[in-house]
Amino acid sequence: MKMSEDDKKLNALFTQARETGLHMPSGLEARILADAASAMPIQKREAPLWRRWFDDLLMGWYGLGGLAAASAAGIWLGVSPPSAFPDAGAYLFGQTGATVDVFAGDDLALVLAEEG
Amino acid sequence: MSSGMDPDAELLAGFARGDMTAARALTARLSPLVYRLAFRLLQDSGLAEDVTQEAMLRLWRIAPEWRKGEAKVSTWLYGVAFNLCRDKLRQGRRRAAAALEDVAEPADPAPSARERLHARQQGDALQGALATLPERQRQAVILRHIEELPNPEIAEIMQITVEAVESLTARGKRGLIKALEARREELGYEDV
């Protein structure tokens, strides 16, 4: 399509406008970069492998605290079980501490009678 | 618009990861474009500066949520700057109207920002002619013929159809020719 004289003149003015240097005022770039620094997203550094395992498997320090408390409670119950609780050993081996006969097979009364 | 290879999107992702070098590169690439557009739309260096800083700040803030491939960073930024400029022009018109209401004597119809702009730019043929155009035509002409953006990008920035862009730029050019013709002798237009 043939360009009219008016279009040519107009295009010359557009070109002139484009070529007229429009420079940013001094200090604007520095202000933009200051804004960038303050708006910079806070980055979480990549955690090391042991820490990721610790966090994922043990659920971090909360998990570890719970595990320690449960372990301590277990040891305490083992050392000093409450009387109301069944004796786990007896339950497993079919005996209780009160009925263990260290002289199984011997009759103490008989022995005393023989000696007497 | 696809932007699989948009280098600005890569830089923006770098900034979101905490890379300040990427922010410097983006500032060097994009802020002069925004300033130039804002200055041409507003014809006011101070306002153009405000718009540029605000548009860039919005870019920094959106960086962590930026999704590559949805839009070109520069188009998005042009759109933000364009809307900020439109707000500034509206505020200017409201202030001008309010100032005129305070004047006791009856005035001629309130001179628009465009007309005041025209008066300021008498020495500049193109700016003077642009100032006579309706706002949308002037914006479309600046984006198309001075910033040299493609019509689909202008449509995205102005939130209108490509056909509407074509119509605005065509009418804008006709209006410019008419305005320049009217000022031919005053401006020495025949020497262009």
Image (spheres, coloured by chain):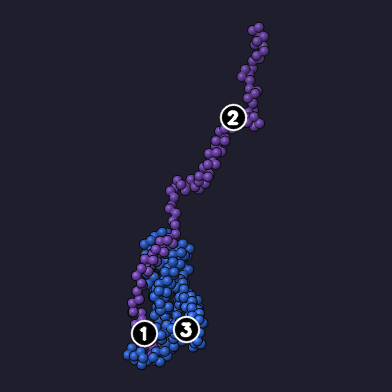
Q: Is residue B80 something that shows in the picture?
A: yes
Q: Is residue B75 something that shows in the picture?
A: no
Residue B22, quarter of picture: bottom left
The colour of chain A is purple
Instruction: Tell me if residue A66 comes above or below residue A8 in the rendering.
Output: above
The amino acid type found where label 2 is placed reads Ser
Q: Is residue A84 left or right of residue B147?
A: right
Question: Which residue is the site of mark 2?
Answer: A80
Callout 3 touching callout 1 (CB < 8 Å): no
Question: Which residue is the site of mark 1?
Answer: B124
Find the distance from the CA under tag 3 to the CA under tag 1: 19 Å
The colour of chain B is blue
Between residue B19 and residue B2, name the one nearer to us. Answer: B19
Q: For mark 2, does the 10 Å Cα neighbourhood hold few (<14), some (14 to 19), or many (20 or more) residues? A: few
Find the distance from the CA under tag 2 to the CA under tag 3: 93 Å
Give how far across and how far down residue B98 sits, in percent: 50, 79
Give how far across and how far down residue B101 sits, in percent: 51, 82
Q: Which mark is on residue B112?
A: 3
Residue A34, quarter of picture: bottom left
- Image depth: mark 2 or mark 3 in front: 3
Give how far across and how far down residue A64 sits, in percent: 51, 42
Label 2 is found on which chain of the structure? Answer: A
- Image depth: mark 1 or mark 2 in front: 1
| Badge 2 element | loop
Q: Which residue is drawn at 45% across and 80% down?
A: B139
Between residue B173 and residue B39, name the one nearer to us. Answer: B39
Label 3 is found on which chain of the structure? Answer: B
Q: Residue at x 43, y 83 (%)?
A: B116
The amino acid type found where label 3 is placed reads Ser
Q: For mark 1, does the 10 Å Cα neighbourhood hold few (<14), some (14 to 19), or many (20 or more) residues? A: few
| Badge 3 element | loop
